[in-house]
Amino acid sequence: MLSLCLFLLPCLSFLPLAPAAKGLEFPQYDGKDRVLDINDKNYKKALKNHSMVCMFYHGPMSDSKELQKQLQMKELVLELAAQVMEEKDIGFGMVDSHKDAKVAKKLGLEEEGSVYVFKADRMIEFDGLLSANILVEFLLDLLDDPVEILENALELRAFDRMEEDIRLIGYFKSEESEHYEAFKEAAEQFQPYIKFFATFTKSVAKELTLKMNEVDFYEPFMEEPVTIPGKPHSEEELVKFITEHRRPTLRKLRPEDMFETWEDDIEGIHIVAFAEEEDPDGFEFLEILKEVARDNTHLPDLSIIWIDPDDFPLLIPYWEKTFKVDLFRPQMGVINVTDADSVWMEMDDEEDLPTAPELEDWIEDVLSGKINTEDDDDDDDDDDDDDDDEDDDDEDNDDNNNEEEDDDDDDDDDDDDDDDDDDDEDDDDDDDDDDE
């Protein structure tokens, strides 16, 4: 039901609660069918007639009414996105994994429930929350040039503020440079998930301390970049370096790539921090977390996911129930992605947040295996064993009580027999008196 709500909410958000003024008229689905049923006869034409084609790969229609509604809601999301993007020359379609298995195989579609975008000779998988506004934003980013050019100090300031993103920036002689061309081709391989920037301006390059044909790699939330060694770089060299260094020490869970982030676990676990950036305690905790990440970015197995609950309001009740934490306060924990078992850092003083050394010690215990979700399972088993022992003790006590009650009953019976004998003797005495 939660998944249905996640798909339904973005659609409902386009329905105005009151008549909107001109300029704020949110689109409403007009009922026109724009999403194609992709099959063996029309898929080539669809790819040829559009600069980009967005395809939703789904399983066969289920007999379950709930699953049918979910599929209908996903189709409605695509229809609304297709309506909004109609003038952008983007096609939309749905591929049934059962009926259109041959087409799916030809196109390279593998994961049911995924959205794939075809642009030129590339296939890009959309790994975000399937809502109309997020999907449209993703497609608009794909329409942009893969490399953004920085020409002045103001643009450089904007670049510096993009701390949540993985960024690369290179300094080249001109757009005709063969090294810039290799940089641009590498950018196309990662668009729109990784941001690529370039400058041809000497003053901008000086501010960035970049030399000619040099490329810097910026990890999220890190103050200093890493210069990619071995300039000038070929496309293959850039792609290899980015692929090897793509997992950041600290990254934010975002709606546009949330599933890709969550699937990128380390041995089945994630170290997760919940913190509201606009909350004073949350902001302070996040700054401490950044400090810890910067001091420990050399650790290859350290990867922390920061989740701002404000970005996922529908998931707050679910997370609080599943993880048994209060998300109105900053939290730090380790989560098993298979069964959602979790262990959370104990914060002794509710008024004071943990210090950077305390966070580092806790993270070190997680990386060493001293803190893990399996221990939590063992604790649960111990609790169950304790409950069983208590039940056994209760049963033993009941047996003892029953035995005592039986003994009491026997004593009572003996007393009654003695009383009866006494009564008989009295009766005999009375009879003797009467005879006399």
Image (cartoon, rainbow, N blue to C red):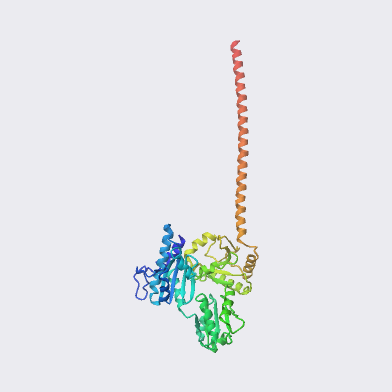
Query: In the image, residue 238 lies at what x, y percent?
Result: 57, 79
Front residue of 325/99: it is 99
Front residue of 88/248: it is 88
The N terminus, quarter of image: bottom left
Q: What number of labels is visible? A: 0
State the residue at coordinates (53%, 60%): 322
Q: Quadrant of residue 394?
A: top right
Q: Quadrant of residue 395?
A: top right
Q: Is residue 363 left or right of residue 127?
A: right
Front residue of 246/429: it is 246
Query: In the image, residue 347 lies at what x, y percent?
Result: 60, 64
State the residue at coordinates (41%, 75%): 90
Query: In the image, residue 426 lies at what x, y percent?
Result: 61, 19
Front residue of 95/208: it is 95
| Residue 179 in sight here | yes
| Residue 130 in sight here | no
Residue 420 versus residue 43 in the image, above or below:
above
The C terminus, quarter of image: top right
Q: Quadrant of residue 344?
A: bottom right
Q: Is residue 91 left or right of residue 261?
A: left
Q: Is residue 406 left or right of residue 72?
A: right
Query: In the image, residue 305 lies at what x, y percent?
Result: 56, 69
